[in-house]
Image: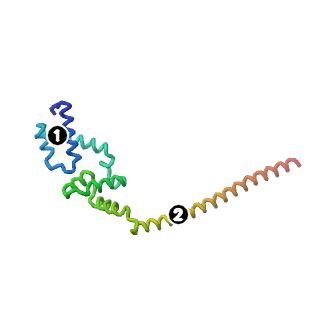
């Protein structure tokens, strides 16, 4: 590989990064960049791969399975893809390792997030009520068991003291 001046290489890498981050980058943009800069395509694609690795290492979402993404990352993906064409969407999905069905499910979830009258709200309210009742029942049971444990401890201590007193009295006689 031909050594290139540092400032020129950095300028080309900045253009590569811009092309990678732009969802509207046309097909063949990297080949055109190679022609414009008079740098072999292989070198441009090698630098492109380096930039991709760098982007993935800086973005915790890229390179991780989509089902492990945070809620915010999923929402950002829904926002980013909302205005994309089918071609752009396909490229985005492939680049980020997202299934179309996953994205559709995230979009539905986002659209229902603030639905206060839907069945999901009533479902969550009933689940919350049952969890509160279960929690209250468990707390009452825990208090009962703590009291029983305290009583047992007290009886054992008293039994030990009574045996100590009896043993002392027998020894005195």
The location of residue 73, given as percent across then percent down, is 33, 52
Tell me if 161 is positioned left or right of 7 in this view: right
| Residue 103: assigned label | none
Instruction: Of the two numbered discs 2 and 1 on the same chain, state the one appearing first in sequence.
Output: 1
The location of residue 159, given as percent across then percent down, is 76, 54
The location of residue 78, given as percent across then percent down, is 29, 56
Q: Is mark 2 in CB contact (under 8 Å) with mark 1? A: no
Tell me if 144 is positioned left or right of 167 in this view: left
**Quadrant position of the N terminus in the picture:** top left
Q: Which residue is mark 1?
A: 44
Question: Which SS class for mark 1?
Answer: helix
Tell me if 171 is positioned left or right of 59 in this view: right
The location of residue 42, given as percent across then percent down, is 15, 40
Name the residue: 70% across, 57% down: 151
Tell me if mark 2 has few (under 14), some (14-19) or many (20+) residues whose alpha carbon lies within 10 angstroms of its own: few
Q: CA distance from mark 2 to mark 1?
A: 60 Å
Q: Nearer the viewer, mark 2 or mark 1?
A: 2
Q: Taking 104 as reference, is 16 above or below it?
A: above
- Say how the picture is coloured: rainbow
Q: Residue furthest right?
A: 173
Tell me if mark 1 has few (under 14), some (14-19) or many (20+) residues whose alpha carbon lies within 10 angstroms of its own: many
Residue 118: image quadrant is: bottom left
Foreground residue, 59 or 158? 59
Foreground residue, 42 or 123? 123
Residue 31: image quadrant is: top left
Name the residue: 18% across, 33% down: 8
Q: Taking 112 as reference, is 34 above or below it?
A: above
Q: Which residue is mark 2?
A: 132
Foreground residue, 95 or 128? 128
Question: Which SS class for mark 2?
Answer: helix
Q: Total marks drawn? A: 2
């Amino acid at each position: 590989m031909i050594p290139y001046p540092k400032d020129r290489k950095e300028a080309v890498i900045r253009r590569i990064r811009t092309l990678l981050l732009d969802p509207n980058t046309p097909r063949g943009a990297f080949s055109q960049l190679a022609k414009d800069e008079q740098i072999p395509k292989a070198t441009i694609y090698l630098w492109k791969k380096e930039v991709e690795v760098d982007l993935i290492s800086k973005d915790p979402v890229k390179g991780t399975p989509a089902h492990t993404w945070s809620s915010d990352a999923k929402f950002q993906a829904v926002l980013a893809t909302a205005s994309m064409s089918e071609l752009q969407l396909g490229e985005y999905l492939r680049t980020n390792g997202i299934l179309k069905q996953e994205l559709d499910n995230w979009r539905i979830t986002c659209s229902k997030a603030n639905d206060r009258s839907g069945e999901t709200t009533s479902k969550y309210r009933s689940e919350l009520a049952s969890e509160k009742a279960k929690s209250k029942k468990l707390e009452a049971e825990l208090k009962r068991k703590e009291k029983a444990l305290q009583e047992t401890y007290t009886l054992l201590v008293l039994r030990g003291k009574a045996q100590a007193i009896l043993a002392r009295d027998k020894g005195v006689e």
